[in-house]
Image: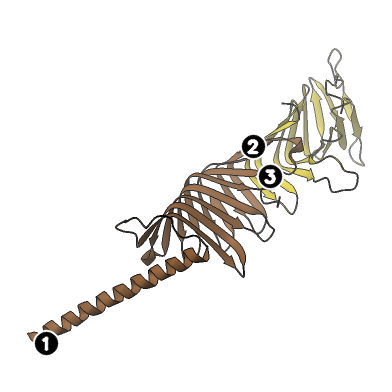
Amino acid sequence: MKGGNTISTKKVIRRVLIAIMAATALSTGVILVTHRSGEVPVTGPATNEKATLTLDKMRHTSSRQGVDEWSVEAETVNLYNTENRAVFLMLTARYFEKSGAVTTLTADKGVLDTETRNMEVSGNVVVTRGGITITSDALTYTKESQVIISTTPVVITDSISRLTGDAMFLDLAGGRMTLDGNVNGTLLEESKGKFDETRSP
Amino acid sequence: QEGEVGINADHLTSDSQGRYALFSGNVRITRDGAVLKADTVQLHYEDGKKKGDTTKGLSLIEAEGNVTMDFEEKHATADKALYDLRKEEVTLTGGPPKVVSGESTLTGKTIVINRLTGAIKVDSGKSTRVKVRLVPGEKGFSFTPEKKDK
């Protein structure tokens, strides 16, 4: 059935061509991303069967009209293109606010939704902003509403006060923080508004 | 530790615009030996911007709802308490406010307790007279303020 064979071969060739085009498009995109940030990954991508692509020692800065909005660095990032997901291991993320304040977040693992830019981080999570440090086991950051939520116990400290709670809701844009459940704290009277976590420095 | 405020509550909401922190739900605040309990407590801060205001930090504790305060073997109750940390003065209103020491009692429209000098000032109102009950042999409401001089 010669006709049949030619048709199926055509299909195979077409699929291979599509795959090659997709891979090219992807690697161009990744190269563009890394070049825009001026950092080319030091070592070649390691292989990871499920991930579309794995990069080591990765750094990316996202800016708009020349102004940096946020940046992320990681020991390893696994890109899952079909799921719009990037998994960062040992990451440091920085958020540059209009007020000039910089929020820095470090964690063992971070899962970024490459479409919404929302992020879930877990493992030794530390957020620092101004003189204040927030530690937790897991946090989620929603870019659209600029909100950080922790559903696991949180510790907020600075040089002269300490505050803990079972869960935290931090509205970066609105400048409002809520702690829920077993709120405990000690503060020295000269603590200058320590609970205003969102105050600009 | 002196000058340290301890706080326990169910919730905290802090708003940088309002420059305050609102604790709510079974709030318990400890400071220099005094224990203040209330439904809600709001901490107010001075940020040192007002003219001549050199002190910064926590300036006022505002407690509201089922307020009780235990200090120097006295027990006070009121609807509302304002604790001015600069003056070391606690102003109790609503309820009406009442202070109990042993069997002795003290009530009026407003009670102001100065934790530095130990002075207690009671004001009456249209419908609330000042009432004092002192029991012989009891310490009553005098106390030697071991508070430091500010």
Give the residue type that dot 1 points to: Gly
Mark 3 packing: few (<14 Cα in 10 Å), some, or many (20+)? many
User: Are dots 2 and 1 on a single chain?
Assistant: yes
Secondary-structure class at tag 2: strand
Give the residue type that dot 2 points to: Arg
Q: Which residue is mark 2?
A: A162
Above or below, A135 against B103 in this view is below
Q: CA distance from mark 2 to mark 1?
A: 77 Å
In the image, which is nearer the foreground, mark 2 or mark 1?
A: 1
**Disc on res. A195:** 3
Secondary-structure class at tag 1: helix
Which chain identifier belongs to the yellow chain? B
- The chain under label 1 reads A
Q: Residue A199 in the image: state x and y as whole percent.
A: 70, 51
Q: Residue B91 in the image: state x and y as whole percent.
A: 84, 36
**Dividing the image into 4 quarters, which one contains the C terminus of chain B?**
top right
Give the residue type that dot 3 points to: Phe
N-term mark: 3 or 1: 1
- The chain under label 2 reads A
Q: Residue A9 in the image: state x and y as whole percent.
A: 17, 80
Above or below, A60 against A180 in this view is below
Which chain identifier belongs to the brown chain? A
Q: Residue at x 81, y 31 (%)?
A: B98
**Dividing the image into 4 quarters, which one contains the N terminus of chain B?**
top right
Above or below, B34 against A153 in this view is above
Q: Nearer the viewer, residue B94 or B55?
A: B55
Taking the image as shown, residue A104 lies to the left or right of residue B62, namely left
Instruction: Tell which residue pokes out farthest to the left in this image.
Output: A1
Q: Which residue is mark 1?
A: A3
Q: CA distance from mark 2 to mark 3?
A: 10 Å
Q: Mark 2 touching mark 1, by CB under 8 A?
A: no
Q: Nearer the viewer, residue B146 or A69?
A: A69
